[in-house]
Each structure stands twice: as C-alpha cells, then as structure tokens.
C-alpha cells in the first residue's frame, strides 16, 4: 500500500504499445512535483490518454516505470492507488440516484454538510438548489436533466470530496455558456490546490493556468515548458 503520499509523480522512460510493433509512447520521461499541474496537449493520437491510462494502471508499460513518491505503482495495491489518484473524465460518470449520492460516490462516510461544502466550493450549489428536490433530486445514468457544464461542476464536487493527492482531468470539449465556463475555471483552480494534476486540457484558460505544458507528438514529448516559455 501507499502510505499518505506527497504526490511526486514521475514517468521514467516509458515505452508502451497497445499492439505489438506500434508504440503509442516512445520513451516518455516526465515529472510532476507534488502540487504541480501539468497540461497535456497534442494532436489526436499523440498519446495523451495513454499517459493517463498508465498512471491509472489501466495498462502497464512495456518499458520504464511510473513512480509516485519514488514507488513503482506496480508495487502498490490497486485499491491504494485508486484512493490517492482521482480521475475526472470528459464524459462524467453519473449513475441513477440522487445528486447527493452522485457527489458522495466512494466517500460513503461523507456527511450532508461535507457534500454541500464541496458543492459550494466548486460553484455547484446554486444550480443544485434550483433543482426540483435540491440535493435529493434523482438523476438518470445519462444525466440528461443536467447540462454538460452542470455535469462538469458535479464531477468537480465529487473529486473535491474524494480529495485525492493526484488528480487526473480529461477536460470536456463541449462548448459551454460563458457564465458556466467562468464557474468551471474558478472551480478548477479550487480543485487543483494542494494536488498534483495531469490535465488533458482543451481550454486555453486551463492551459494558461497550468504550471507546465507538455506537448506530445506521435508518442514523444515535443516541447515542455510554461505558457510563457512556449
Ligand atoms: P485524442 O486527442 O484523440 O484523445 P490521444 O492523444 O489521447 O488522442 P491516445 O488515445 O493516447 O491519443 O492514442 C495514442 C495512440 O495509441 C494512437 O495511435 C491510438 O490509435 C492508439 N490507441 C489508443 N488506444 C488504443 C487501444 N485501446 N487499442 C489500440 N490502439 C490504441
Ligand atoms: Mg485521448
């Protein structure tokens, strides 16, 4: 198991292929110090999702290692890894149940107060309060009574409550109205405080706010630096 982690993440010379002879990552070395945010950018097929897949241990590298605080993540139980590495996906996973339960998710011990505090912190409380039954409103699996922006805010509240040291964000590409967009930007800043994060970033504001931008191309790192440097 991982003891309480600091959140240093290092990809050490990673080679990975889904199919033999077709490497998706061709020797990636990348480090995020505890608390740093990294934006992964690059064309379709460049390897952004693959990097995330390896950090979540959906796959293991063919060569090289992924280290958290110096521990190879292969030596850590999946349960321990999952409790410290959180993921917010583009297509937020909403299950049939109340809004409250959707925010609570894995944090079965969370009180109503904690759930509402998380929602408030990411600006989700206002729209939730306006739903027919507030936090007790039932949503469907497809979440179709919620807009994309609202789903995103809900997933931020869930992530904040889960409080992982390492956060992965696959940012939604859907166009969102300006007001919600601003809320999302602010919420994201709140969510990133004190965590190491890897973001597949689509919004310029997200890229600009990242500590480091990593540009991928055909499984290689092409450029790496701050927004000012690139
Ligand atoms: P996008 O912006 O489209 O999401 P990406 O940068 O996330 O692209 P990856 O999904 O990491 O790209 O893909 C990297 C390479 O691996 C691509 O050549 C892709 O075709 C291949 N690939 C990705 N997933 C699989 C899979 N499950 N099986 C086989 N090949 C895959
Ligand atoms: Mg992808």
Image: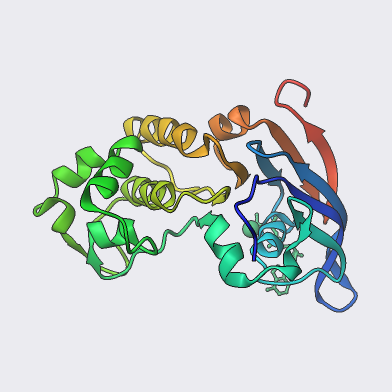
- Residue drawn 64% across and 63% down? 56
Residue lying farthest left? Answer: 132
Q: Position of residue 99 (x, y in %)?
A: 24, 57
Q: Residue at x 81, y 68 (%)?
A: 61
Residue at (84, 46) in percent of width and height = 221
Left/right placement of residue 131 relative to residue 113 reads: left
Question: Quick check: can you spot residue 144?
Answer: no
Image-quarter location of ligand 2: bottom right
Residue 224 seen in render = yes
18 to 104, vertically: above or below: below
Decide which of 8, 28 is in the foreground and name it.
Answer: 8
Indicate the position of residue 74 as horizontal and vertical percent values: 75, 69
In the rendered view, would you say 163 is above or below 179? below
Residue 118: quarter of image: top left
Q: Say which of 116 and 215 sits in front.
A: 116
> Which quadrant, please, contains the N terminus?
bottom right
Corner quadrant of residue 93 = bottom left
Instruction: Give above or below for 75 relative to 145.
Output: below
Q: How many marks?
A: 0
The C terminus: image quadrant? top right
């Amino acid at each position: 198991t991982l003891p309480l982690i600091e959140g240093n993440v290092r990809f050490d010379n990673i080679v990975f292929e889904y199919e033999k002879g077709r490497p998706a990552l061709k020797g990636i070395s990348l480090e995020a110090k505890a608390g740093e945010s990294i934006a992964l950018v690059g064309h379709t097929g460049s390897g952004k999702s693959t990097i995330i897949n390896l950090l979540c241990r959906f796959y293991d590298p063919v060569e090289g290692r992924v280290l958290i605080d110096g521990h190879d993540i292969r030596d850590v139980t999946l349960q321990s890894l999952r409790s410290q590495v959180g993921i917010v996906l583009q297509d937020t996973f909403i299950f049939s149940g109340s809004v409250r339960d959707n925010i609570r998710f894995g944090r079965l011990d969370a009180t109503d107060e904690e759930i509402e505090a998380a929602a408030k912190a990411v600006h989700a409380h206002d729209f939730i309060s306006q739903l027919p039954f507030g936090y007790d409103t039932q949503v469907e699996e497809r979440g179709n009574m919620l807009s994309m922006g609202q789903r995103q805010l809900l997933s931020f509240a869930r992530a904040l409550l889960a409080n992982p040291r390492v956060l992965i964000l696959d940012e939604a590409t859907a166009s969102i109205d300006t007001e919600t967009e601003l809320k999302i930007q602010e919420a994201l800043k709140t969510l990133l405080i004190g965590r190491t994060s890897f973001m597949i970033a689509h919004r310029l504001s997200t890229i600009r706010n990242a500590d480091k931008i990593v540009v991928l191309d055909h499984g290689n790192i092409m450029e790496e630096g701050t927004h000012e440097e690139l």
